[in-house]
Amino acid sequence: MTDGMNGRCLCGNLQFAVRGKRLWVAHCHCDSCRRNTGSAVATFVGYNKDQLTYTRGERKFYESSPGVRRGFCADCGTPMTYEADRCPEEVHLYVSTLDEPGAYRPQLHVFFAERIPWMDLNDDLPRYQGLTPGAEPASWGPLHDQTEGHKG
Ligand SMILES: [Zn+2]
Ligand SMILES: [Zn+2]
């Protein structure tokens, strides 16, 4: 699917645009993403880095584990991006920072084993307990540490 969309943080000091074909859309239930967002689940869309342009402001970064950088707005604290050394071409955006998140229908769940137990999801999407297994492109899903704990 070809798409283009603008997005921003809560205060508007960070504004961005994405252009071209998205790579994937996924719900991540991992502990790190839940803490980072304060939400029950974090929903990401993946793009290649050259598809993302910041039109206003610059992100600050927090290295949440070695090789993992989470970008955020220094003024309002909105989580904006996830980047990891293991997928250096990619940037993962939080769908809810885009102007029309409804256009990004999720395709799968990752780290479903870490979901909050009361999270009752009535969809028929694939539910991977960790990251997606071997057959998928390496880019599938927000890629965190694939070893035990995978704190990202
Ligand atoms: Zn902001
Ligand atoms: Zn995660």
Image (tube, grey):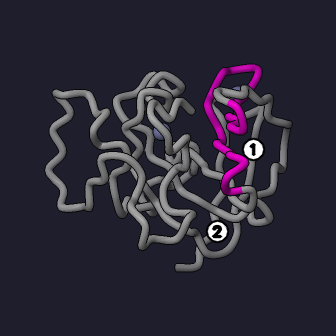
Q: Which disc, if any, is residue 15?
A: 1
Residue 143 image position (x, y, % from top left): 55, 49
- Name the residue that disc number 2 marks: 4
Residue at 79%, 34% in the rendered image: 59
Q: Nearer the viewer, residue 8 or 110?
A: 110
Residue 41 lies left or right of residue 80; in this view the side is: left
Residue 1 lies left or right of residue 105; in this view the side is: right
Residue 106 lies left or right of residue 141; in this view the side is: left
Residue at 68%, 46% in the rendered image: 84
Residue at 61%, 75% in the rendered image: 21
In the rendered view, would you say 46 is above or below 135?
above
Badge 2 crowding class, 10 Å Cα cut-off, few under 14, some 14 to 19, many 20 or more, is: few
Residue 100 image position (x, y, % from top left): 50, 55
Q: Quadrant of residue 83?
A: top right
Q: Quadrant of the C terminus?
A: top right
Q: Amino acid at mark 2?
A: Gly
Q: Which residues are magenta?
A: 66-87
Q: Quadrant of residue 68?
A: top right
Question: Judging from the image, what secondary structure is the residue with disc 2 in?
Answer: strand
Q: Amino acid at mark 1?
A: Gln
Residue at 61%, 32% in the rendered image: 79
Question: Judging from the image, what secondary structure is the residue with disc 1 in?
Answer: strand
